[in-house]
Amino acid sequence: MPSTKEIKERISSVRDTLKITNAMYLISSSKLKKAKKSLADTEPFFYSLQSAVTRMLRHAPDMKSPFFYDNEDKDDTDKKAGILVVTADKGLAGAYNHNVIKIMDQELLKYKDSRVYCMGQIGEHYLESRGVEIDKEFNYVVQDPNLSRARRITEQLVDDYLEHRVDKIIMIYTRMENALTETTEVRQLLPLRRESFIDPNAARILADVPVETIKFVPSPEDVMRRIAPEYVTGFVYGALVESFCCEQNARMTAMQAATDAGDEMLKSLSTEYNRARQAAITQEITEIVAGARAQAESR
């Protein structure tokens, strides 16, 4: 059995660790609330952009735009894909990073050629250890997602797509289903899909609604060239904030589990300490009684 001194040192170590896990839980909780508020504040603008794209496609169905060009003559395996991956900058977040990396490996195997855009140091270190070339690293993004950084990322993606360096761009991020469930998503950013903007029931719903007149200046294609990148920016920003929320939620869950395990360990160590202390006291009493008895017999 360990000595009482050793057990006291372990108890002190566990208590120090619990202070850290409690602090990390509270920090993640605060960051989660702030990120959710930021996303809620910007959602109306990007929903309006989505609505604008839908209206444009309804009024100019024959519009030719590179943002909707889909290389249908190519198989997915023959396309050069740009893969935008969102991981965390640090661990201690349960299976959050592992789930993203697992899906990323699956997507990399689908394409003969791909360009990887990585966000988060965990993903960067993993790709470097595997010898995968990272085309672009976006540092200091995942811990503070904001619109300016999302626009900088989108500019790089749109430029590579329009210059035909990639045929399509997909994004791997984590979406929060609810407070307990997170899902790793694979979403195609470019080219945009017309069917994702057009409701199949829209024709029936709008049959009796007067058709509005819209004039595009200078042309529908030029207007779409301005709106489409903003729409992609909105999605990238939303995905960054959702991933950040999922990371903080996963870290809260992990820290809560660690705190609960620490509390159980403290109870176990306290019981062990009391038993060791009782055994030491009993041993001392036994030695005192034995010594007194030996003295009495010697007289």
Image: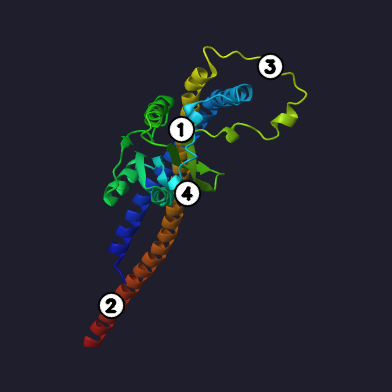
Label of residue 287 in the image:
2
Amino acid under label 2? Glu
Q: Is residue 93 visible?
A: no
Q: Earlier in the sequence, mark 3 or mark 2?
A: 3
Identify residue for label 3: 212
Distance from disc 1 to disc 3, alpha carbons, whole Å, reads 31 Å
Q: Earlier in the sequence, mark 1 or mark 3?
A: 3
Q: Residue 155: which quarter of the image?
A: top left
- In the depicted structure, whether residue 213 falls above or below residue 268: above
Q: Earlier in the sequence, mark 2 or mark 1?
A: 1
- In the depicted structure, whether residue 174 falls above or below residue 109: above
Q: Given contact means CB atoms under 8 Å apart, are the residues at marks 4 and 2 in contact? A: no
Q: Earlier in the sequence, mark 4 or mark 3?
A: 3
In the image, which is nearer the foreground, mark 4 or mark 3? 3
Tell me the element at label 1.
Answer: helix
Identify residue for label 1: 236
